[in-house]
Image (cartoon, helix red, strand yellow):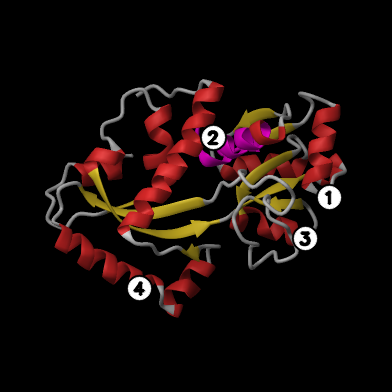
Amino acid sequence: MLGTDAAAKAAPDGYTLALNNQGSVAMAPFAVAKMPYDPSKDLAPVTTVVKVPEIVVAHPSLGVSTLAELIAKAKAAPGKINYGSAGAGGITHLAGELLKSEAQIDIVHVPYKGAAPAVSDLLGGQVQMGIFDVPVVLPHIKSGKLKALAATTGKRVPTLPDVPTTAEVGYPRVISDNWYGLVAPAGTPPEILKRLNAAAVAALHTQALADQFAKVGGIPFPSTQEEYRAFLADEQARWGKIIRAIGFKESD
Protein backbone atom coordinates (compact mmCIF):
# COMPACT_ATOMS: atom_id res chain seq x y z
CA MET A 1 0.00 0.00 0.00
CA LEU A 2 2.84 2.42 0.76
CA GLY A 3 4.37 1.91 -2.67
CA THR A 4 1.05 2.09 -4.45
CA ASP A 5 0.16 5.26 -2.57
CA ALA A 6 3.49 6.83 -3.56
CA ALA A 7 2.73 6.11 -7.21
CA ALA A 8 -0.83 7.43 -6.90
CA LYS A 9 0.50 10.76 -5.61
CA ALA A 10 3.39 11.04 -8.08
CA ALA A 11 3.49 13.29 -11.13
CA PRO A 12 1.48 11.65 -13.95
CA ASP A 13 4.34 11.76 -16.43
CA GLY A 14 5.01 8.04 -16.92
CA TYR A 15 8.23 8.05 -14.88
CA THR A 16 6.75 6.71 -11.63
CA LEU A 17 4.99 3.35 -11.70
CA ALA A 18 3.99 0.81 -9.07
CA LEU A 19 4.11 -2.97 -9.18
CA ASN A 20 1.02 -3.66 -7.11
CA ASN A 21 -0.37 -6.92 -5.80
CA GLN A 22 -4.02 -7.83 -5.40
CA GLY A 23 -3.88 -6.92 -1.71
CA SER A 24 -3.21 -3.25 -2.38
CA VAL A 25 -5.92 -2.73 -5.01
CA ALA A 26 -8.52 -5.52 -4.66
CA MET A 27 -8.55 -6.36 -0.93
CA ALA A 28 -7.37 -3.28 0.98
CA PRO A 29 -10.28 -1.04 -0.17
CA PHE A 30 -12.63 -3.31 1.79
CA ALA A 31 -10.35 -4.26 4.69
CA VAL A 32 -8.57 -1.03 5.62
CA ALA A 33 -10.46 1.58 7.62
CA LYS A 34 -8.80 4.62 6.02
CA MET A 35 -7.48 4.08 2.51
CA PRO A 36 -4.93 6.72 1.41
CA TYR A 37 -5.91 6.26 -2.25
CA ASP A 38 -8.80 5.01 -4.36
CA PRO A 39 -7.59 2.36 -6.84
CA SER A 40 -10.40 3.20 -9.28
CA LYS A 41 -9.82 6.96 -9.26
CA ASP A 42 -6.17 7.52 -8.38
CA LEU A 43 -4.47 4.84 -10.48
CA ALA A 44 -4.28 4.13 -14.20
CA PRO A 45 -3.89 0.44 -15.12
CA VAL A 46 -1.01 -0.43 -17.43
CA THR A 47 -1.06 -4.24 -17.53
CA THR A 48 -1.36 -7.25 -15.31
CA VAL A 49 2.10 -8.80 -14.99
CA VAL A 50 2.30 -12.20 -13.32
CA LYS A 51 0.24 -14.81 -11.50
CA VAL A 52 1.52 -17.10 -8.75
CA PRO A 53 -1.01 -19.94 -8.41
CA GLU A 54 -2.05 -21.19 -4.99
CA ILE A 55 -2.89 -24.72 -3.90
CA VAL A 56 -4.93 -26.36 -1.15
CA VAL A 57 -2.65 -28.61 0.91
CA ALA A 58 -3.28 -30.87 3.88
CA HIS A 59 -1.16 -32.72 6.43
CA PRO A 60 -1.18 -36.48 5.76
CA SER A 61 -2.54 -37.11 9.26
CA LEU A 62 -5.85 -35.57 8.16
CA GLY A 63 -6.35 -38.64 5.99
CA VAL A 64 -7.62 -36.91 2.85
CA SER A 65 -6.30 -37.08 -0.70
CA THR A 66 -8.84 -34.94 -2.57
CA LEU A 67 -10.70 -31.70 -2.02
CA ALA A 68 -13.98 -33.64 -1.94
CA GLU A 69 -12.66 -35.79 0.91
CA LEU A 70 -11.52 -32.68 2.81
CA ILE A 71 -14.92 -31.03 2.44
CA ALA A 72 -16.73 -34.21 3.50
CA LYS A 73 -14.51 -34.48 6.57
CA ALA A 74 -15.06 -30.82 7.45
CA LYS A 75 -18.83 -31.22 7.15
CA ALA A 76 -18.75 -34.29 9.36
CA ALA A 77 -16.79 -32.44 12.05
CA PRO A 78 -17.61 -28.70 11.98
CA GLY A 79 -15.01 -26.48 13.62
CA LYS A 80 -12.52 -29.30 14.10
CA ILE A 81 -10.18 -28.65 11.17
CA ASN A 82 -7.77 -25.71 11.41
CA TYR A 83 -6.17 -23.91 8.48
CA GLY A 84 -3.05 -21.79 8.76
CA SER A 85 -2.42 -18.53 6.91
CA ALA A 86 0.41 -16.06 6.45
CA GLY A 87 -1.62 -13.41 8.31
CA ALA A 88 -5.12 -12.03 8.80
CA GLY A 89 -6.52 -10.15 5.81
CA GLY A 90 -4.03 -11.51 3.28
CA ILE A 91 -4.58 -13.83 0.33
CA THR A 92 -3.88 -17.05 2.26
CA HIS A 93 -6.49 -16.08 4.86
CA LEU A 94 -9.16 -14.88 2.46
CA ALA A 95 -8.62 -17.87 0.16
CA GLY A 96 -9.56 -20.08 3.10
CA GLU A 97 -12.63 -17.97 3.77
CA LEU A 98 -13.59 -18.19 0.10
CA LEU A 99 -13.36 -21.99 0.26
CA LYS A 100 -15.44 -21.99 3.44
CA SER A 101 -18.12 -19.89 1.79
CA GLU A 102 -18.31 -21.83 -1.47
CA ALA A 103 -18.13 -25.30 0.12
CA GLN A 104 -20.28 -24.30 3.11
CA ILE A 105 -17.89 -25.76 5.65
CA ASP A 106 -16.72 -24.64 9.09
CA ILE A 107 -12.92 -24.65 9.31
CA VAL A 108 -11.00 -22.53 11.81
CA HIS A 109 -8.52 -19.83 10.77
CA VAL A 110 -5.14 -19.73 12.53
CA PRO A 111 -3.13 -16.64 11.46
CA TYR A 112 0.67 -16.57 11.53
CA LYS A 113 3.20 -13.82 10.94
CA GLY A 114 4.22 -14.93 7.48
CA ALA A 115 3.97 -18.05 5.34
CA ALA A 116 7.13 -19.67 6.74
CA PRO A 117 5.85 -20.21 10.30
CA ALA A 118 2.42 -21.23 8.98
CA VAL A 119 3.92 -23.90 6.73
CA SER A 120 6.26 -24.99 9.52
CA ASP A 121 3.31 -25.66 11.83
CA LEU A 122 1.43 -27.34 8.97
CA LEU A 123 4.36 -29.69 8.47
CA GLY A 124 4.34 -30.38 12.21
CA GLY A 125 0.61 -31.08 12.25
CA GLN A 126 -0.28 -28.15 14.53
CA VAL A 127 -2.68 -27.03 11.79
CA GLN A 128 -4.18 -29.49 9.34
CA MET A 129 -4.41 -27.56 6.07
CA GLY A 130 -3.85 -24.29 4.27
CA ILE A 131 -3.89 -22.55 0.89
CA PHE A 132 -0.46 -21.28 -0.10
CA ASP A 133 1.52 -20.14 -3.13
CA VAL A 134 2.72 -23.22 -5.00
CA PRO A 135 6.46 -22.40 -4.68
CA VAL A 136 6.14 -22.21 -0.88
CA VAL A 137 4.83 -25.76 -0.52
CA LEU A 138 6.03 -27.50 -3.70
CA PRO A 139 9.09 -29.18 -2.10
CA HIS A 140 6.93 -30.54 0.71
CA ILE A 141 4.36 -31.87 -1.78
CA LYS A 142 7.12 -33.55 -3.79
CA SER A 143 8.57 -35.14 -0.63
CA GLY A 144 5.18 -36.44 0.50
CA LYS A 145 5.09 -34.33 3.66
CA LEU A 146 1.97 -32.52 2.41
CA LYS A 147 -0.97 -33.63 0.27
CA ALA A 148 -1.90 -31.41 -2.69
CA LEU A 149 -5.69 -31.41 -3.03
CA ALA A 150 -6.57 -28.77 -5.63
CA ALA A 151 -5.05 -25.75 -7.35
CA THR A 152 -7.09 -22.58 -6.77
CA THR A 153 -6.41 -21.25 -10.25
CA GLY A 154 -7.90 -21.39 -13.73
CA LYS A 155 -5.50 -23.93 -15.28
CA ARG A 156 -3.51 -26.81 -13.91
CA VAL A 157 -0.13 -25.79 -12.52
CA PRO A 158 2.77 -26.86 -14.77
CA THR A 159 4.84 -28.08 -11.82
CA LEU A 160 1.91 -30.17 -10.50
CA PRO A 161 0.13 -31.37 -13.64
CA ASP A 162 -1.69 -34.23 -11.86
CA VAL A 163 -3.40 -31.94 -9.35
CA PRO A 164 -6.87 -30.80 -10.50
CA THR A 165 -8.07 -27.21 -10.32
CA THR A 166 -10.90 -26.20 -8.03
CA ALA A 167 -13.10 -25.70 -11.11
CA GLU A 168 -12.48 -29.30 -12.19
CA VAL A 169 -13.75 -30.60 -8.85
CA GLY A 170 -16.86 -28.45 -8.71
CA TYR A 171 -15.77 -25.13 -7.18
CA PRO A 172 -15.14 -22.74 -10.09
CA ARG A 173 -15.43 -19.63 -7.91
CA VAL A 174 -12.65 -20.74 -5.55
CA ILE A 175 -9.90 -18.82 -7.36
CA SER A 176 -7.11 -17.23 -5.35
CA ASP A 177 -4.17 -16.50 -7.61
CA ASN A 178 -1.53 -14.32 -6.02
CA TRP A 179 -1.13 -11.77 -8.80
CA TYR A 180 0.75 -8.58 -9.58
CA GLY A 181 0.12 -5.71 -11.96
CA LEU A 182 1.62 -2.44 -13.16
CA VAL A 183 -0.11 0.88 -12.53
CA ALA A 184 0.62 4.56 -13.12
CA PRO A 185 -0.81 7.69 -11.49
CA ALA A 186 -4.26 8.69 -12.73
CA GLY A 187 -3.99 11.48 -15.25
CA THR A 188 -1.03 9.95 -17.05
CA PRO A 189 -1.54 10.82 -20.75
CA PRO A 190 -3.12 8.02 -22.80
CA GLU A 191 -0.25 7.98 -25.29
CA ILE A 192 2.23 7.37 -22.48
CA LEU A 193 0.10 4.59 -20.99
CA LYS A 194 -0.12 3.01 -24.44
CA ARG A 195 3.67 3.05 -24.81
CA LEU A 196 4.17 1.62 -21.32
CA ASN A 197 1.66 -1.15 -22.00
CA ALA A 198 3.29 -2.05 -25.32
CA ALA A 199 6.77 -2.25 -23.76
CA ALA A 200 5.63 -4.26 -20.74
CA VAL A 201 3.53 -6.70 -22.75
CA ALA A 202 6.38 -7.24 -25.22
CA ALA A 203 8.68 -8.14 -22.32
CA LEU A 204 6.07 -10.44 -20.80
CA HIS A 205 5.92 -12.41 -24.05
CA THR A 206 9.66 -13.15 -24.02
CA GLN A 207 10.94 -16.59 -23.05
CA ALA A 208 13.68 -15.02 -20.94
CA LEU A 209 11.18 -13.35 -18.62
CA ALA A 210 8.97 -16.44 -18.54
CA ASP A 211 12.01 -18.46 -17.44
CA GLN A 212 12.77 -15.98 -14.66
CA PHE A 213 9.18 -16.06 -13.42
CA ALA A 214 9.18 -19.87 -13.52
CA LYS A 215 12.04 -19.92 -11.00
CA VAL A 216 9.66 -18.46 -8.39
CA GLY A 217 6.51 -20.23 -9.59
CA GLY A 218 5.21 -17.28 -11.59
CA ILE A 219 3.26 -17.39 -14.86
CA PRO A 220 3.36 -14.36 -17.22
CA PHE A 221 0.01 -12.54 -17.23
CA PRO A 222 0.04 -9.73 -19.84
CA SER A 223 -3.13 -7.79 -20.64
CA THR A 224 -4.49 -4.67 -22.25
CA GLN A 225 -5.36 -1.72 -20.03
CA GLU A 226 -9.06 -2.49 -20.50
CA GLU A 227 -8.56 -6.16 -19.61
CA TYR A 228 -6.71 -5.16 -16.43
CA ARG A 229 -9.52 -2.78 -15.48
CA ALA A 230 -12.15 -5.51 -15.97
CA PHE A 231 -10.04 -8.10 -14.14
CA LEU A 232 -9.59 -5.73 -11.20
CA ALA A 233 -13.34 -5.16 -11.01
CA ASP A 234 -13.89 -8.93 -10.87
CA GLU A 235 -11.26 -9.32 -8.15
CA GLN A 236 -12.74 -6.49 -6.09
CA ALA A 237 -16.17 -8.10 -6.35
CA ARG A 238 -14.78 -11.48 -5.26
CA TRP A 239 -12.76 -10.31 -2.27
CA GLY A 240 -15.08 -7.48 -1.24
CA LYS A 241 -17.90 -9.99 -0.80
CA ILE A 242 -15.76 -12.26 1.39
CA ILE A 243 -14.28 -9.45 3.48
CA ARG A 244 -17.70 -7.99 4.17
CA ALA A 245 -19.13 -11.44 4.98
CA ILE A 246 -16.53 -12.15 7.66
CA GLY A 247 -16.61 -8.57 8.98
CA PHE A 248 -12.84 -8.13 8.67
CA LYS A 249 -11.53 -4.59 9.16
CA GLU A 250 -7.93 -3.52 9.71
CA SER A 251 -7.27 -0.22 11.45
CA ASP A 252 -4.91 2.29 9.90
* Left or right position of 61 against 127: right
Near mark 1 (Cα within 10 A), the count class, few <14, some 14-19 or many ≥20, is: some
Q: Which mark is residue 87?
A: 2
Q: Which residue is mark 4?
A: 203
The range drawn in magenta is: 84-100
Rendered residue at 38%/56% (across/down): 227
Q: Position of residue 83 (x, y in %)?
A: 69, 35
Tag 4: residue type? Ala
Q: Position of residue 214 (x, y in %)?
A: 53, 69
- The one of 82 and 202 positioned closer to us in this rendering: 202
Cα gap from disc 3 to disc 1, whole angstroms: 15 Å
Label whose residue precedes the other's in the sequence (4 or 3): 3
Label whose residue precedes the other's in the sequence (4 or 2): 2
Q: Which residue is mark 3?
A: 143
Rendered residue at 40%/34% (across/down): 28
Near mark 3 (Cα within 10 A), the count class, few <14, some 14-19 or many ≥20, is: few
Rendered residue at 41%/74% (across/down): 205
Near mark 4 (Cα within 10 A), the count class, few <14, some 14-19 or many ≥20, is: some
Task: Please say if 240 is above or below 198.
Answer: above
Rendered residue at 31%/57% (across/down): 225
